Image (spheres, rainbow, N blue to C red):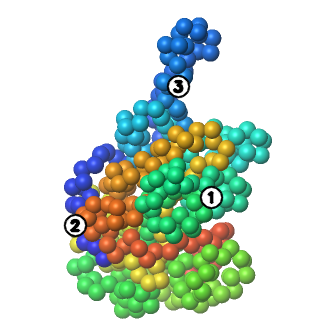
Amino acid sequence: MIQLKKGLTVLSALALTSSILAGCGTKADNANSNANASSADASAPASESSTSPASDKPVEFSFYFTGSQNVKDMWDTLVPKFEEQNKDVKVKLVYIPSGTGAQPTYDRILAAKQAGKGSGDIDLYEDSLSNVTKGGKDDLWDTLSLDSIPNIGKINPKTMENVSNLAVPYRASAVVLAYNSDKVTTPPSTLDELYEWIRNNPEKFAYNDPTTGGAGSSFVTTSIYKDLPDEAIYSTDPAIQKDWDNGFATLKDLGKYVYGKGIYPKKNQGTLDLLANGEVDMITAWSDMVLEQTAKGQLPATTKMKQITPGFNGGPTYLMVPKLSEKKEAVYQFLDYVMSPEAQGVIVEKMHGFPGIELSNMPQEIQDSFKGVSEGFRSFNIGDLDKEITKRWQSEVAAQ
């Protein structure tokens, strides 16, 4: 576990550069990403072409990504740093605001391939594990290697093996227990201990409605899969639903002990607000949100985090290179920079996420700040079964 105040002091002490993750892009924002050296007019005389040969122009590639404003801010910070050091490459950022969804971008890449039109002018794509896996089946992604991107050697080899080297996990976060250490001196270490704590401390624990945010969904899913085989969290077989009964019975029983005797706040922020104002002493929350809000003074300095066993959901956000992109060499150059300790330090400071590379490659202060929470989480990959979980939760738990 880590003292957030200390962790945040460390992160801010890095003083690495400006903001990072996300949000509402405007047409003007996206226009900035199109700022390129002008292409020579195809009809220009030969003498003009010789003074500005094509080989001297930077290679521009298109990078499609989505997320909140802080994600956009992050790339708006990193890309100029990269271009300053790599004059031969230009990154065209194409931002898809959070809420509009990244699926149309995936569909465009797939449709372009099926129509024999290359990668659809998409050279780099950011998304979650589900589309890494789906794209592997659709044969969309390039296989990445150390020869092309030396800094992927700094990533945990098992993490790369899990995606068959089809994607770069450039940052990560996890759901953890966040608690007020003034009120909770000995936090739970296991899920069973957490259940006991909830029952012994009525209305002092909250998790959000799982249909409105991943922190609540993680608590529900982790409870349902608690006593199932380890491999179950990778199964999309609907037959597994018959093994969910015990987990749902536990969640239903806990309802009378959680905040408001069965009140489930909306969104991940809902439970963070309850922790901030002292209405509860412990919640499930995303680690990056806890770190960011403690840094801003929105959560008390007494806030701490801890991962439990079995671990809550967590995992990386990935970058994929379409196999049919014609700009792959330039993209490799950019990915190598993104996975450098320098760029990863910016991501840590601005996104408050875990580095994509192994912590041993980062400064000691950053290693210390994530001790106890950057490991132990699990990456669930259950496909559309999560929709069945939320429907059953609403009818059996929320409606009681």
- Residues marked 1 and 2 touching at CB (< 8 Å): no
Instruction: Residue 256: tell me if it is visible.
Output: no
| Residue at numbered disc 3 | 55
Q: Give the amino acid at mark 1.
A: Asn
Is residue 203 placed above or below 295 in the rendered structure? below
* 3 vs 2, front mark: 3
* Residue 153 placement (x, y as % from top left): 45, 59
53 or 15: which is nearer to us? 53
Residue 131, numbered label = 1
Question: Residue, x 54% and y 7% (percent of image)?
Answer: 47
Image coordinates for residue 123, horizontal then vertical, percent = 59, 42
Helix or strand or loop: what does disc 2 sit on?
A: helix
Up-down relation of residue 12 to residue 113 (above or below):
below
267 sits to left or right of 135: left
Q: Earlier in the sequence, mark 1 or mark 3?
A: 3
Q: Report x, y in % for residue 377.
A: 46, 74
Q: CA gap, disc 1 to disc 3?
A: 35 Å
Between disc 1 and disc 2, whose residue precedes?
2
Q: Is residue 167 above or below residue 58?
A: below
Q: Nearer the viewer, residue 100 or 208?
A: 100
Which residue is rendered at x = 52% and y = 52% of the image? 147
Instruction: Choose between 207 and 131: the one closer to the eye.
Output: 131
Residue 131 appears in the figure: yes
Q: Amino acid at mark 2?
A: Lys
The image's mark for residue 6 is: 2
Upstream in sequence: badge 3 or badge 2: 2
* Foreground tag (1 vs 3): 3
SS class, disc 1: helix
